[in-house]
Image (spheres, rainbow, N blue to C red):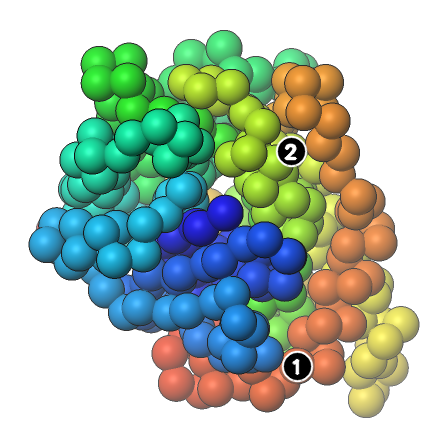
Amino acid sequence: MRAIVTGGAGFIGSALCRRLARTPGWQVLNLDKLTYAANLASLDGVEVAAGYSFLQGDICDRALVDQTFAAFCPDVIFHLAAESHVDRSITGSAPFVQTNVVGTHTLLEAALAYWGGLKGEERERFRFLHVSTDEVYGSLGAEGLFSEETSYDPRSPYSASKAASDFMASAWHHTYGLPVLISNCSNNYGPFQFPEKLIPVVILNALEGKPIPVYGDGLNVRDWLHVDDHVEALALIAVKGRLGETYNVGGRNERTNLQVVRTICGLLDEFRPRADGTPHTDLITYVTDRPGHDRRYAIDATKLETELGWRAQHSFETGMRETVRWYLDRADWWRPIREGRFAGERLGLRPST
């Protein structure tokens, strides 16, 4: 199988490239613009694999995308390229619309033209997997789970842009017959996550003795999914999923943000105690909540589990231990980011008017 992974230098995309490039029978082309959150260091070791190649490029560049499809002849498009940080979308929404909406439209049009020229087995084999988020569903109450039938109710510029791209992907299947699949995942975590997201922010701020920011009362709930479990699901959906269908991918690991923070602090107390002997929880600082902060997300992954036989292999406890240890061991990966691109400052404030 020949796969193009868009956004393959990002957090989830690099995990997918690592997984596919090391799997016999896969040839992988990583197409990435290399924006601020991309990091080719996340692919150390993979770049020498015989089945892996990299191309720097923008998914909004139709000529480049057409040329790439024609030259590489993919069987599968894994579309992960996206602006993905809610806080940044609040401060400036334009890049989210450009990449997530315009970029997805460009890819769909290019894929349609490419697929239209295929014949026989190659045409039957082609798939376009659009990778999205549970945030398109909006906010849950205290009970219930997001299913594939849940109505969309995006609440942030980021989730609105992803909802638009989901609808386009579905429309290109129903209108033109393009063999599209869609996945919506819960919050990912694990090694190589850019340190603007909750878990790496907490780990790195704690290591540096900086305040650990907790938005609002800290009781917003998320379902946590280890990135390696997620990419296993993506590989499975692309090969065995039913065309035109959506599959929700969740870890069944609901935790409040405050529980996540306290778990990390406890692990750091165990692995890297503070010099003065005080607990890392002393660094917790409650800050003004993010505008439009959804209260609770939770994914029902029953469809994926029953139809395709996928199961998350990481519990929250085992996954968090592994993740904290990884950041402790890999300062060579995160320190250049903290010193050059993002030092952990507060994001997600409304732009001044």
Instruction: Tell me where residue 80 appears, x and y as whole percent.
Output: 40, 48
Residue at image location 17% in from the left, 56% down from the top: 67
Residue at image location 65% in from the left, 44% down from the top: 232
Q: Which residue is mark 2?
A: 250
2 and 1 marks in contact (CB < 8 Å): no
Indicate which disc residue 169 carries: none
Residue at image location 10% in from the left, 54% down from the top: 63
* Residue 103 seen from this side: yes
Tell me the CA gap for discs 2 and 1. Answer: 27 Å
Q: Which residue is mark 1?
A: 330
* Residue 257 seen from this side: no
Q: Give the side of residue 188 with respect to residue 88, left or right.
A: right
Along the viewing direction, whichever of 227 and 268 lies nearer the viewer:
227
Residue at image location 53% in from the left, 45% down from the top: 216
| Kind of residue at disc 1 | Arg
Q: Give the side of residue 126 with respect to residue 250, left or right.
A: left
Q: Secondary structure at mark 1?
A: loop
Q: Secondary structure at mark 2?
A: loop
Q: Is residue 280 above or below residue 307?
A: below
Q: Is residue 268 above or below residue 294?
A: below
Q: Is residue 39 above or below residue 320?
A: below
Give the farthest residue toward the front.
Answer: 120
Along the viewing direction, whichever of 42 and 70 lies nearer the viewer:
70
Instruction: Tell me where residue 154 appears, x and y as whole percent.
Output: 36, 27
Q: Give the side of residue 156 with respect to residue 102, left or right.
A: right
Identify the image quadrant of residue 229.
top right
Q: Is residue 127 above or below residue 174?
A: below
